[in-house]
Image (tube, rainbow, N blue to C red):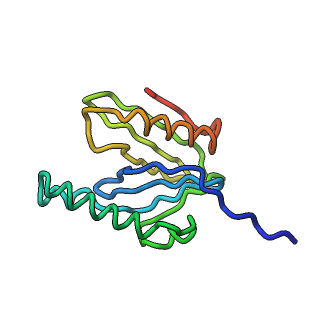
Amino acid sequence: MAAPSAETLLGVLFDLKIGLDDFDLLFTDRRVVAAKTGTSGMGHIVGGVVGAVIVSALERTTRDQYAGLSPEQILHAHKRNFAIPFASVESAELNGGIPSITIPSLTFRAGGKKTRFGMMSSFWKKDQASIANAKELLRVTLGAKAEFKKV
């Protein structure tokens, strides 16, 4: 009986949000692993440049803790980390948003549950490289289950 093959990391989307929680999404050949990297609200409490520096440093520290870990190890490294197996995904939608009105978002529907990630914290600009990266990762991993709006 053959041993299961190792999980392959295909790409990462950085700095997505669910509420005030910040996540990086690790796309593998089997699933998406959502790795919590911080909380956006912490910087807003302090505010301004100082708050931005604090949040940036905390996120770097969390990402540094994930360095060298497998997707499975990252999944279990924080209680808020979670995985979405591709086999359970009913659909995924990448929405580019409306400039100056709504932010880009990535929504997964899996196992009867909807999980929506905001893709940036600024309403004023769209990060075209992040959108293109997300589109390619969804195309490769989910094929026809992926929908693209305003991208």
- Residue nearest the viewer, comparing 29 with 145: 29
Is residue 21 shown above or below 125?
below
Q: Position of residue 129 (x, y in %)?
A: 43, 36
Q: Residue at x 35, y 53 (%)?
A: 18
With 15 as the anchor, is 122 left or right in this view? left
Q: Position of residue 134 (x, y in %)?
A: 50, 40
Horizontal side of residue 101 vs 150, given as left or right: left
The one of 150 and 73 positioned closer to us in this rendering: 73
Between 24 and 103, the residue placed more toward the observer is: 24
Relative height, residue 126 to residue 33 (above, below):
above
Residue drawn at 14 percent across, 52 percent down = 49
Location of residue 95 by image quarter: top left
| Residue 62 in the figure: left or right of residue 136 | left
Q: Quadrant of the N terminus?
A: bottom right
Residue at point 55% right, 57% down? 84
Q: Position of residue 92 (x, y in %)?
A: 53, 42
Q: Which residue reaches farthest right?
A: 1
Q: Position of residue 128 (x, y in %)?
A: 41, 32
Quarter of the view holding residue 105: top left
Counting the numbered discs, the total is 0
In this picture, is 114 found above or below 35?
A: above
Task: Give the position of the C terminus as an image quadrant.
Answer: top left
